[in-house]
Structures are given as structure tokens and as C-alpha cells.
Image (spheres, rainbow, N blue to C red):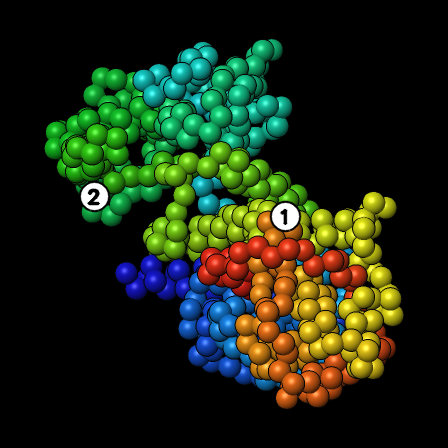
Amino acid sequence: MLLTIGALIVVLGVLIFVHEAGHFVAAKAMGIQVLRFSLGFGRPVVSVRWGETEYCISWLPVGGYVKMAGLEDEGLAGEVEGGKATAPVDPARAFDRKPVWRRLVVILAGVTMNMVFAYAAYTTLAYSGVLSNQLATTQVDSVRVSDLPPGTAALRALRRGDRIVTVNDDSVSTFDELLSRVVAQSGRVRLGVAGRTEPVVVELPPGDSTARASIVRALQPYLAPVVAEVQPGGPGDRAGLKPGDRVLRVEADTIPSWGDFSRMIRARAGQRVTITVAHGDSVRRLVAVPERKVETDPETKQERVYGVVGVLARLPVLPKLGAMGALRFGWRETVFRVGLVMQIVRRPRVQELGGILTIGQMSGQYARSGFATFLEFMAFLSINLAVLNLLPIPILDGGQVVFLWSWSASCSSPSATTSCASSPMSSPVRRELEEYVAGRVTPERAVIAATAAYYGERGMGKGEWLRPVIDVIDRASPGIVELSSVTEASGFEVRLAERPFPKQYEAELRRAAQAALSGLAAPGAPAVPAVPAVPAPRARPGLLTRFTGALRRLFSA
């Protein structure tokens, strides 16, 4: 249990750090002020300030965030992100004041770092020569016909010793790679066999994980019947088996492969077995009694008895790759794993999905298998997180990219009714505020113009310059502004409640308007989008609408 919990903490901590570090580094490089970098959500447990940035570990370890200037939130989203940052905000370095391409770089940096981490992990494993589950052979020992799913009967044509060299014209060099590429395919799959002019062709139904699992069970790799290791004190050791022994016969049956030797031993639990082996020029006859073991059949869930003698086969290993070979392998493996995850995403099955508990269980299992297997699991999980984060869902990076891209495209369209880069000098809300400061329009008119611009455009990052005015409105007359959600776009429709603006706050409102206009005139101030006419009101937004909006802003980076 402790190992599982520790492994889960390592996996989540590393992958969250890698993802958020991507956003952090990109924001710094793009000239955006970073107020807080946190692993976890909620109030910080540990907090250290270095320069203008607060570095935290927060109490809810299910994610992380980078709080940037211009994206500070209040209410639910602000509490999830640890509350208001204490560092003073530099408006000129706010996220929403940067060009669209810089914001896109920051948003995509997290998934980019996840991909880079996976590529680095696969490359390191390849260069170190400790790749797990890489059986350096594609020779087939046998095909379990009973496990073949519909559409794969052509695999019966494979014979012991056949070497599969390609899957849909892509070369394969290990049995793990062979199986992985087969299960990643959909529809027609062509297996190229060395020495044959025509490929073996099978049909795999899309998204059928059961059929793919059946193929994995049906194809058995060929291993020579040569002993590599002998368990000290085990049945094989007591019988006299030595590393390097080649098994010739069990009883009177000739043994052409390790698979045959294993099957015959498993079937003779607790029985005396005569094993004939060769070592160099000498041939010996040994007598062993396979130890009785019990396991649960994964299909029938029934217990079954089998025998073992405590020996391991000699496995063909991959030659150690040089630096360039490892780089190529890392790239090929990363691209292949991305395709595998995308296939699952396109046709998700409930039984293939898992949450935090599943990740925790798998983390513990892979940690017990050794560092190389654990690192390989982390690399694959990092690719999963990258691909899932690119889905066009509002709270994910992909949703933010789609929103920002579509907004930018609509602004630059010749048919657009308003210009997203229109000058602040010609902005209707600016004109309304100037008229109000000059005493030529009523405070109610200034309030409706400011709230329409702020709530209608805040989702695009264009309304924060109006914040001083909005703060006064909220204090002066809570509820005077009525919002209703817009189905076709982001933001809200706005109207003024049927009551006048309190006269005792008019002076403060005028000062706030002057402050907003002064800040807008400062060098580097953002262009303010034109404010469309205020439409007729709809129903007030419900709790779900406001909660969704908070989540969308929360994950905007």
C-alpha cells in the first residue's frame, strides 16, 4: 500500500510539474508576469516567494496551475487557485494584453512539455539499453487457433519460425512492437512475413479491444529451449539443470521451442519428469518433480494448478543503441504511442477508462517491476495527458486554443461587424465614460455601457481596464446590473434594473471612470473592442452557468 501511494505521488507530482513548468517557462519567455506557480489546488500548504512569483504546494494534489497577471479570478475560481496573489500586478505584462500568438504559445506549452518528457524518457531508455518488454525477435512459435477473433483466420497460415517483418508496411524489430502495432490498427492489417511474396491479411473491427486482446494471446513468440537462469534450491536446481543447457526432450517428446517445454512442465505438476538436455558436446538425462502452483484463470475466474521447475529462458536482447539510434527510437516510439492514445480517444470504451484509483494501482504495479518499467509507464501516461488536454473542451488547453483561435479569426474576418483591434480612442464605452465625466450623460448610461463591455468581453480578456468602474457599481448598488447568458457566444447580455444609480456614489463612480480612462491612455494599453448594442434580456444565469464560466477561466492557462 505504501509503495502504491508513494508511486502515485511521484507520478502525479512529476507529470503535473512538467505540464505546469511548460506554461511557466513560456509565460516568462513571452513577457507575461507570473504571480503564482502551484502544484495542487486550494490554499497553499508550503509557499516560498522568489522575486515576483510565489511557488506553492497546495493541499489538493489533483492538478496544478500558473496564475498570470490578467487572469486573476475571484469567487470560486479564485479560491481554487489559492486566493488573491499578494504581488502587485503589472498591467503592461498581463496575459490578455499580449498578442494572440504569444497567448497561444503559453497555452500550448504545457502539452508540449508532456510530449518532450515522453520523448526524453523513451530516448533515455533506448540509449541505456534497459527498455522493458522488448523481446528482440518477431519469430512466431505457434498460433493458438482457439483464441483467434473473427476476421483473423489467416493467421493460421503462420508456422513455427516465421518471422514477421512489417505491419502495414511499417517495419518491426521486437515482438512487443509487433503486437503493439497490430492492436493499434483498424480495418485491414497486412503482416509481411520474411520469405513470402504475399502478406498475411486480417480484418480488425474498429474499437474492439476484446479482439485485440485475443490476438495478443494467440500469437506466441519463438524462443529457443535454452536455460538462462536456474532458481537456487528449486526443482530444476535439485535435478541438475544448469544455465546454458538446451532442452532436447521431455520424456519421449522432442522439444523444438521454449513454449513446448513450458507447456509440458506446466501440465505435470507434482509428477516425476525425465528431461534430456545438451550442454556443449555432452547429453544428460535428468529427473525433476515440477513444483505445484495455483493461479486464477483470467477468463473463467476458476483456480487451476500448474507446475514449475524454477528456470528462465534465454531471451534475445536488443543491441545497445548509439546516441542517434536512441534519438530515432525515442521519436518513433513517441509518435506511435500518440497514435495509440488517439485511437482510444476516437472510440472510447468504458472498460478502458480509469480514474485516479486506477492510475494509483497501475503506478504501484509498475514501480514493483523496476525503474525502467516505471519510467516507461510515466512516459505513456504523459502522452495520455497531452492528448487529452488538446481535446476541444472549454476547461482544457485545447478548448482555450479553439476559443482564442476562433475569436482571432472572427476579428480578422472582412465580414466582422466589429474590429477586435479597434482603437481605444474610438471605443463606444470610452466615449460614454468621457461623456459621463464631462457631465453630458446620466450615470445609468455610463453604468450600462461599462457593464456591457466588461461582462460581454471579459471572456476574451479585454475588459479588465474597466475593473475600477465595476468595483464601484458592485459596492454602490448590488443587483442593479442583471446578466443573462448568451447561447451563441461567450460573455453575458446586460441590462440595468429599474432603479436609479445611488446619488451618494456618483462622485466615486466619476473618479473611477477617470481612473479607467487614465489607465487606458497609458503607453502599451490594450485596444478596447467595440461594444455592440445591448439586446433584450434573457433569464438570469443559473449556478451551473456561473460555475462553468469559473472553470473555463480557471483552466485558461
Do we see residue 33 in this rendering? no
Q: Which residue is mark 1?
A: 488
Q: Nearer the viewer, residue 102 or 239?
A: 102
Residue at 44% x, 53% y: name it.
374
Q: Which residue is mark 2?
A: 234
Residue at 81% x, 50% y: name it.
417
x and y, in percent, of residue 210 in the image? 38, 28
Q: Amino acid at mark 2?
A: Gly
Q: Is residue 166 left or right of residue 44?
A: right
x and y, in percent, of residue 247 in the image? 31, 27
In the image, which disc is placed on residue 115?
A: none
Q: Is residue 305 left or right of residue 135?
A: left
Q: Quadrant of the C terminus?
A: bottom right
What secondary structure is found at the residue carrying circle 1?
loop
Circle 2: is it few (<14), some (14-19), or many (20+) Cα within 10 Å? some
Q: Is residue 74 shown above or below 212?
A: below
Q: Is residue 460 shown above or below 187?
A: below
What secondary structure is found at the residue carrying circle 2?
loop
Q: Nearer the viewer, residue 517 or 270?
A: 517
Q: Quadrant of residue 267?
A: top left
Q: Nearer the viewer, residue 485 or 448?
A: 448
x and y, in percent, of residue 151 in the image? 44, 15
